[in-house]
C-alpha cells in the first residue's frame, strides 16, 4: 500500500519542526496543567501527528489527543471541544484553548465557554484579537499569559 510508505517518508524527511520554544514550554505546562490537544488534521492523519509528538518528546505531556480524522468532526464544532474537556475531566469554563486560527480555534472554543488564547507566531491573524481572551506571538511568553488568565479578575 502506498499510504504507509508516503507517511514513512513524511515522518523522516518532510515533517515540520516544532515552533521555536514549544519543546521547552509544553513540558513545564504539563507539570502544572492537564493538557489536551485538538487538531484538524488536514492531509496528515492523527497517527502521524502522534509520531511527531513522540519524536519531539511531547507525547507524554498530553492527557488527551483529539484528532479530527479519528473523532469525526472538525473545529469549530462544539462536540470536538466538549469531548476534549470531558476527557480531561474539566468543565469548559475551567479550560483555555490555544490556537492560531480565529474562525476555528477561537470561535469554536469561545462558543462552548472556554477561555481562548490566540497564537500569532505562525499566521499573525490579528482579526482574531477581538474574540480572544489573550494573545501571544512567542512560546516563551505563553506561561505569563496563562498566569494572567489564572488570576481571579480574568475569570
Image (tube, rainbow, N blue to C red):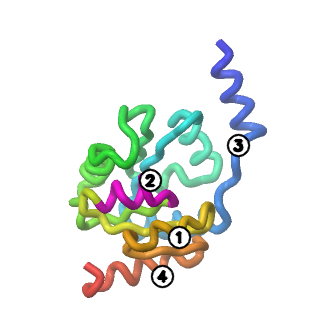
Query: At 39% across and 70% down in the image, what residue appears?
Result: 132
Residue 53 position within the rendered picture, expressed as x and y whole percent measured from the top left: 57, 48
Q: Are marks 2 and 3 in contact (CB under 8 Å)?
A: no
**For marks 3 and 4 on the same chain, the one whose residue lies earlier in the sequence:** 3
**Which x, y percent locates residue 49?**
56, 41
The residue tagged 3 is 15
Q: Earlier in the sequence, mark 2 or mark 3?
A: 3
Q: Residue at x 39, y 51 (%)?
A: 63
Determine the CA span between mark 1 and mark 3: 27 Å
Main SS of the magenta part reads helix
Q: CA distance from mark 4 to mark 2?
A: 20 Å
For the N terminus, give its image quadrant: top right
For label 3, the crowd category at 10 Å Cα-Cα, with few meaning under 14, some 14 to 19 and many 20 or more, is some
> In the rendered structure, which disc, 1 or 3, sits on the residue that comes first in sequence?
3
127 sits to left or right of 113? right
Q: Which stretch did the figure color magenta?
A: 100-110
Callout 2: helix, strand or loop? Answer: loop
Which residue is labeled 1 in the image? 126
* Number of the front mark, 2 or 3: 3
Residue at coordinates 56% horizontally, 68% vertically from top-left? 120
Residue under label 2? 62
Label 3 secondary element: loop
Amino acid at each position: 500500500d502506498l499510504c504507509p510508505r508516503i507517511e514513512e517518508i513524511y515522518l523522516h524527511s518532510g515533517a515540520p519542526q516544532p515552533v521555536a520554544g514549544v519543546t521547552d514550554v509544553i513540558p513545564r505546562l504539563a507539570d502544572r496543567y492537564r493538557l489536551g490537544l485538538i487538531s484538524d488534521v488536514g492531509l496528515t492523519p492523527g497517527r502521524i501527528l502522534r509520531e511527531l509528538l513522540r519524536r519531539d518528546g511531547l507525547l507524554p505531556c498530553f492527557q488527551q489527543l483529539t484528532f479530527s480524522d479519528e473523532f469525526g468532526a472538525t473545529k469549530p464544532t462544539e462536540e470536538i471541544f466538549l469531548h476534549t474537556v470531558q476527557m480531561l475531566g474539566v468543565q469548559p469554563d475551567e479550560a483555555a484553548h490555544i490556537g492560531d486560527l480565529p474562525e476555528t480555534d477561537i470561535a469554536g472554543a469561545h462558543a462552548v465557554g472556554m477561555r481562548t488564547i490566540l497564537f500569532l507566531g505562525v499566521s499573525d491573524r490579528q482579526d482574531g484579537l477581538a474574540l480572544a481572551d489573550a494573545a501571544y506571538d512567542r512560546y516563551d511568553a505563553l506561561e505569563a499569559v496563562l498566569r494572567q488568565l489564572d488570576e481571579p479578575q480574568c475569570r
